[in-house]
Image (cartoon, helix red, strand yellow):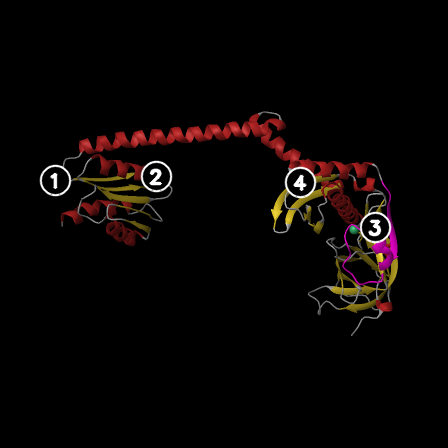
Amino acid sequence: MPPLRNNMTDRLYYHDSFLHEFEGEITEVVPAVEINGRHGVYLDRTAFYPTSGGQVYDTGWIAPTGYSEKLRVVEVAETEDGRVVHYIEADKAPQRGTRVRGLIDPARRRDHIQQHSGQHVLSAAFIRLFNMPTVSFHMGEEVCSIDLDAPTLTEAQVKEAEALANEIVQENRPVEIKFVTQAAAQEMGLRKPPRTDKDELRLINIRDFDLSACGGTHVQNTGQIGCILLRKTERVRQGWRIEFVCGQRAVATARRDYTTLTEAAALFSGHIWDVPQHMRKLLEDVRSATKGNERLLDELAEAQASRLLAETVAENGRKLIVRTFKGRDLTFVRLLAQKLTRLESNVVVFLASTSEQPSLVFAQSKGMPFDMGALVKETLAKLGGRGGGSKDFAQGGVPTAEGLEAALEELPRRLRA
Ligand SMILES: [Zn+2]
C-alpha cells in the first residue's frame, strides 16, 4: 500500500537536536510476538533519531500515561513508508491512543551529535584542502570512519586536514538548519549532491565552511564538537579510510592511549615518548640473543654428537644410537640427529624428546639401507601420534611421553632381524 503523507511521523529532531523530552501519542503497536521479542511502538511525533545516513539510533525511555514505570527504548528504526518505529522491551505493550512522554538518553545523543557534526567538518576540510570527496561515513561503537575518494593520501595531508577541522571547531561557527526546495539547493552549491527525489531538502550550514543536505542531528555551534582526532588511515577499494573520534570520545580515546603507553613505558622505566626507541632496542637484543642461542645449540649438538659417536662401538659395520632426552626439545633433537648421521657414514639413530611436546626423530647416514619414514610411521601407529618423512630422515609427535622410550628400545632388534 503506498504510504500516506499524513501518516508519516513528525520528526522533532529535524528542528532541534537538543530536544531530549517530548510528548506524543501512540498511533500503532506491533506486539513482541511478531517482531523478535520487542514491541514496535509508533508515535505521531518523535524526537528519537532512527538509524540512517551513517548515524546510529538514539535510545531512551517512553513513559505512557497511567504507567508507573518508564519503558526502555532499545532501538529506533525507519520504516519504508517514512515512519519511525521505537522498539521497547516490556511485559505488556501500551495501547494505541495512549499519550506518552518520550525521553532521549542525553549522553548517547550528545556523543552522536559530536561524531556526526565532526564528520561534516572533517569531510569539508578534505574537500577544501585537497578536493577529496567523502563517499561514505560509518559511526561505530568506538570509532567512526569516512571513506575518501582519493588515489593517494599522505600523513602530511591527514595532519593538515585535522588542523583545519579543529580550527573550525575552535572558531565556534554557527551551524544552522535550513529547509529549501530542490531547485533552490541546486543553486546553493552543496558539498555532495543529495540522492533523493524529495521536493524539500534539509540543509546543514556550517557558516562559510560547509553546506550539505542531511537528516541527522547536529551541534548548534562547532565548538560543541569539542575536538576532532584523526586516527588510523588505510587503503580501501574506493580510496582511503580514515578513522576518527570527536568530543568526549576523543578524550576517552586519548586517556586509553595514555594508559596503554604508560604501562609500556613502566616496563622500561622510561618516558612514554621513548617507548618506540626502547622497543627497537629490545627487539634488536632479542634478535641477537636468538642468533647467539642458535649458534650455541649448534655447537652443543656437534660436541654431543662427537662424544656419542666416540662412545659407540660399531656392530656389523654400523653404529646404532638410541637415546631419549628429557630436557631437550624437538629442534635440538633434530639437530643432533643431523650431526650424528653426517659426521660418520654408518650411523642409524633413534632419538626422542619427552619434553612438553613429546616427539621422535629417526635418521640414518646417507646410503644406509633402512627406511626411517616407514619405521616412524609404524612406531607412531603404536603410540597414537602423527608424522613421517623420507628414507633417511623422519620425525613425529606423540600425545604423551608414556611408552616412548620402550618403543625406541625395540627398534634395534628390528634392524637385526
Ligand atoms: Zn549530518
Q: Amino acid at mark 3?
A: Ile
Q: Amino acid at mark 2?
A: Thr
Q: Nearer the viewer, residue 45 or 88?
A: 45
Residue named by callout 4: 231
Give coordinates of residue 356: x percent, y percent: 38, 41
Q: Nearer the viewer, residue 95 or 295?
A: 295
Q: Is residue 292 above or below residue 122?
A: above
Whether residue 2 appears in magenta in the rendering, the answer is no
Cβ(mark 3) to ligand 1 < 8 Å? yes
Instruction: Tell whether label 2 touches label 4 (CB within 8 Å).
Output: no
Residue lying furthest left in this view? 316
Is any atom of residue 349 visible in this view? yes
Q: Which mark is residue 204?
A: 3
Q: Nearer the viewer, mark 2 or mark 3?
A: 3
Residue named by callout 2: 331
**Where is the N terminus found, in terms of image quarters?**
bottom right
Residue at image point 30% right, 44% down:
360
**Label 4 – label 1 distance at C-alpha:** 70 Å
Of the numbered discs 1 and 3, the one sitting upstream in the chain is 3
Look at the numbered disc 4 and give the secondary structure of its residue. strand
**Label 3 – label 4 distance at C-alpha:** 26 Å
Q: Which mark is residue 317?
A: 1
Of the numbered discs 4 and 2, the one sitting upstream in the chain is 4
